[in-house]
Image (cartoon, rainbow, N blue to C red):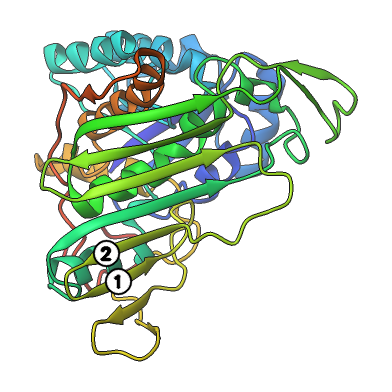
Amino acid sequence: MIKAGIVGAGNISGIYLQNGSRFESMEIAAIADMDHARAVSRAQQYGVRALSVEEMLQDPELELVINLTIPQAHAAVNLQALEANKHVYVEKPFAVTLEEGRQVLRLAKAKGLYAGGAPDTFLGGGLQTCIKLIQDGAIGTIVGATAFMMSGGHESWHPDPAFYYKKGGGPLFDMGPYYMTALVAMLGPVKRVTGAARMTRQERLITSQPKAGEIIQVEVPTHVAGIMEMEAGPIATLLTSFDVAGGSVLPRIEVYGTEGTLLVPDPNDFGGKVLLRQAADSDWREVPLTHGYHENARGLGAADMAKAILTGRTHRASGHMAYHVLETMHAFHASHSAGTHIVIDSTCAQPAPLPVGLQDGKLDG
């Protein structure tokens, strides 16, 4: 078993800690935060140790750092952990800039260490069922896909929403990784991107507690749309927005094949309904989920990486896939600025599907 420590005691840390002893390959044993009081509070809640970041990096018992800091700190914390000879797994996005992402991958390779990144929701039962249906030929040859993330923004519910509108934030960099990782996991890597973007408002009013009434200065586009041409041939359309005031009825993801259509569940979740309509069908039919991990299993990607460290196999939520998604997201903005297609330099392996019939907590058959 690999023992892990979390850096960052914010909102998302709770579910990681809740799942901290769930997986056979990993135990979360400690947490650190710049605000030590927050780390102590989380540690007491979940029965782990509260450390400073420096103590965590120096602790020989902790082999893996799970980085849950804000996006602007992702690369810096990853590089610190790698320099301390610890494997790293980071919340999305993998980094803010492409050069930061490349630095992390280069250092991990030089040190012989593993680097991975969220989201890991594609390992849940919903998306794994979709991957199996596609690979089994249920909808024939894949022609294309659509993905929609339509929201009014986070300032109405998140306790500290400002960073969602800073560099490394916005709807594409915040929620886009779920949708794009799902598309890459189902259809393979991206070859070329064409995008358009806009910043609808330069200021956002926080209406959630405890910072209701504060004004956020917006630094990033809040409505981004574009097309991805996949290496294998399909064409995918992506639309992400924090500017939808009246709600939306668009599907999360649909995949279109020569023999049918697949309605994919919310890629921010692990389960959900999978609906299939083949060419001869008169209506949609629900497909029973073929894989486990239907509920919130955040940490599953880190546990899969821990299993890979122990066995020497390739991990599924890899740093290379997370970097490929990062480069593709940057390409949407770059295409808008340049008014042209952007060719993606990186590529990645399509992650291996999980085996059918796994017991909860296990990653390999």
Q: Could you tell whether 352 is left or right of 293 in the image?
A: left
Compared with 168, 319 (above or below) is below
Tell me where residue 234 appears, x and y as whole percent: 18, 51
Compared with 121, 44 (above or below) is above
Q: Could you tell whether 360 is left or right of 209 in the image?
A: left
Q: Nearer the viewer, residue 323 or 85?
A: 323
Tell me where residue 29 appears, x and y as whole percent: 46, 36
Q: Which of 267 and 48 is in front in this view?
A: 267
Visible residue check, residue 343: yes
Q: Could you tell whether 263 is left or right of 73 in the image?
A: left
Q: Name the residue under label 2.
A: 256
Compared with 67, 287 (above or below) is below
Visible residue check, residue 7: no
Residue 282: quadrant of the picture: bottom left
Quadrant of the drawing holding the C terminus: bottom left
Tell me where residue 55 appears, x and y as whole percent: 47, 13
The amino acid on which the numbered mark 2 sits, given as a three-letter code, is Tyr
Q: Earlier in the sequence, mark 2 or mark 1?
A: 2
Q: Which of 223 and 149 is in front in this view?
A: 223
At a point 42% along the width and 14% down the height, the residue shown is 77
Q: What's the distance in space between the residues labelled 2 and 1, CA to CA?
A: 5 Å
Q: Mark 1 points at which residue?
A: 261
Residue 99: quadrant of the picture: top left
Query: Mark 2 and 1 residues: CB-CB less than 8 Å, in contact?
Result: yes
At a point 72% along the width and 36% down the height, the residue shown is 158
How many labels, in total? 2
Residue 318: quadrant of the picture: top left
